[in-house]
Image (cartoon, rainbow, N blue to C red):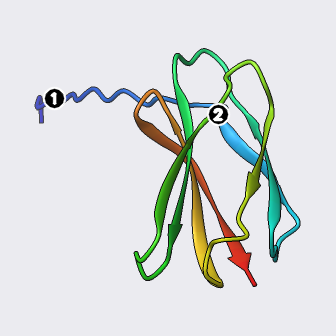
Amino acid sequence: EGCFSEDQITVNVTNNKIKDITPNPATDIVTIKYKISDVVTAQIRLVKMDNSIDRIFNLNIQANKIILDISTFTPGVYAVTLICDGEVTDSKTLIIQ
């Protein structure tokens, strides 16, 4: 009665995302389509779920896709992560056969 409590939080909403990964499953070439805006740097990170492979690919922030040669990657399940200005903004799964 008569008590009041207030708190403030900041929520950052981003539209930066991975739109599509094709083909999925993939064997040698994969196209990753993305949507990014208002960023200085952006990367795609591929990490095999057992952490045995971890590669980062710099993105052209003026483009909307990257084509990757994955022929040397071992088969398995990978996390494909979009990193914009050092912050993870989206993640999807890729299966390499």
> Is 86 on the left or on the right of 38, as rendered?
left
What residue would you read off at disc 2? Answer: 16
Q: Are marks 1 and 2 in contact (CB under 8 Å)?
A: no
Q: Position of residue 49 (x, y in %)?
A: 49, 78
User: Badge 1: how crowded within 10 Å, few (<14), some, or many (20+)?
Assistant: few
The quadrant holding residue 76 is bottom right
Residue occupying the far right of the picture? 23
Q: Say what amino acid the circle numbered 2 marks.
A: Asn
Identify which residue is drawn at 52% across, 16% down: 40
The quadrant holding residue 50 is bottom left
Choose between 89 and 2: the one closer to the eye. 89
Q: Position of residue 42 (x, y in %)?
A: 55, 31
In the rendered image, the vertical position of residue 65 relative to residue 97, given as above or below = above
Q: Which mark is on residue 91?
A: none
Q: Quadrant of the C terminus?
A: bottom right
Q: What kind of element bears circle 2?
A: loop
User: Badge 2: how crowded within 10 Å, few (<14), some, or many (20+)?
Assistant: some
